[in-house]
Image (tube, rainbow, N blue to C red):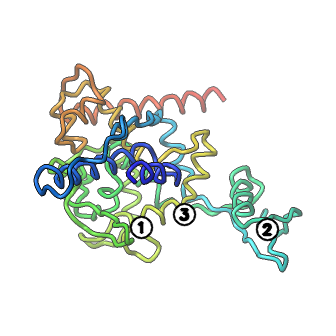
Amino acid sequence: MVRQWRADLLGNGVSVSVAAKAYRLLRAVLMTAVEEDHIIARNPCRIRGAGDEHAQERPVLTVAQVFEPADLVGRRPVGNVRKLKDNAYRLRFQRHGEMRTHPEIFTGRADAERALWKMGMDGRADCTHDRRFRALVLLATFASLRWGEVSALRRTDIDLDAGTVRVRVAFVERSTGELVLGPPKSKAGRRVVGIPDVVVQAIREHIATYVPDEPGALVFFGAKGGPLRRSGFNTRTRWVDVVREMGLPGLHFHDLRHTGNMLAAESGAGLKDLMARMGHDNVRAAMIYQHAVRGADRAITDAINRRLEERDDDQDTGTAAG
């Protein structure tokens, strides 16, 4: 039964990593049934290697690659998809202010919507651009914030003059779809993190443009003003299409934090300072990102600043050369 249960998990698309976590939990529960409650004679969880995780190496973006999705998310082509009587779909799009009909008939809505998005990206259709998500991408990356942390930020949590963000709480989405506001993932998750100067400017513009003038207002929020869900973000920004366009299919939002952690580790920060910035109370987790490092949070922020300034210098040089 245990073998069949695990095979069904993997067969239904559950990752090896998640299946291993589930297997370890089941094994621990049944071990209690054997050793403490004496309900069963032996633990049936005896599949060699089933509890081992072999997580795929996650991508680390360059600074330029971080700015690319930040500038692309929120772009939406002007058009619509209509269903025809024979369950096919027709695409209409706007070009130079004039609505036009695409000559192709699509067999699925998703195919038509993907074609419309592609036309917007390559200039064949007019686009609108909602830039409220640009600061979200930049802050999550360069301040090493988890999704639940960045989506729970209030106006009062950001000190633009000091260039810091304070993490106090985080949203957790339960399997029922309910959003619960609670403490961060770990005790070390409550922290104050320095924000690079370039990102401070992006947040300053974001707050001035989109955030209500109330201390408790959410910095990043959903379509109706409530908490921003990850699924809503993915849908509104067409995240899957954006990262595919970048040549990075399968890139997760959490990979932005992974990139920020790697940049922080490259700064020469000490292990304790690195743990504090990332919100880790587990030494092993922080050691993944560094080898022999020294420094403090300000040094981390300054190092990221230098990387961002190098990007600006490169862009200026490119412009001048053109």
Q: CA distance from mark 1 to mark 2?
A: 32 Å
User: Do callouts 2 and 3 mark residues in contact (Cβ within 8 Å)?
Assistant: no
Residue type, label 3: Thr
Q: Earlier in the sequence, mark 3 or mark 1?
A: 1
Residue type, label 1: Tyr
- Secondary structure under tag 2 reads strand
User: Do callouts 1 and 2 mark residues in contact (Cβ within 8 Å)?
Assistant: no
Query: For residue 89, which quarter of the picture?
Result: bottom right
Give the residue pinned by disc 3: 235
Q: Is residue 31 visible?
A: yes
Q: Relative to 252, is 28 on the left or the right?
A: left
Q: Which residue is located at x 63 percent, y 26 percent? A: 321
x then y, percent, for residue 247:
61, 39
Q: Relative to 105, is 185 on the left or the right?
A: left
x then y, percent, for residue 123:
74, 52
Residue type, label 2: Leu
- Secondary structure under tag 1 reads helix
x then y, percent, for residue 158:
25, 57
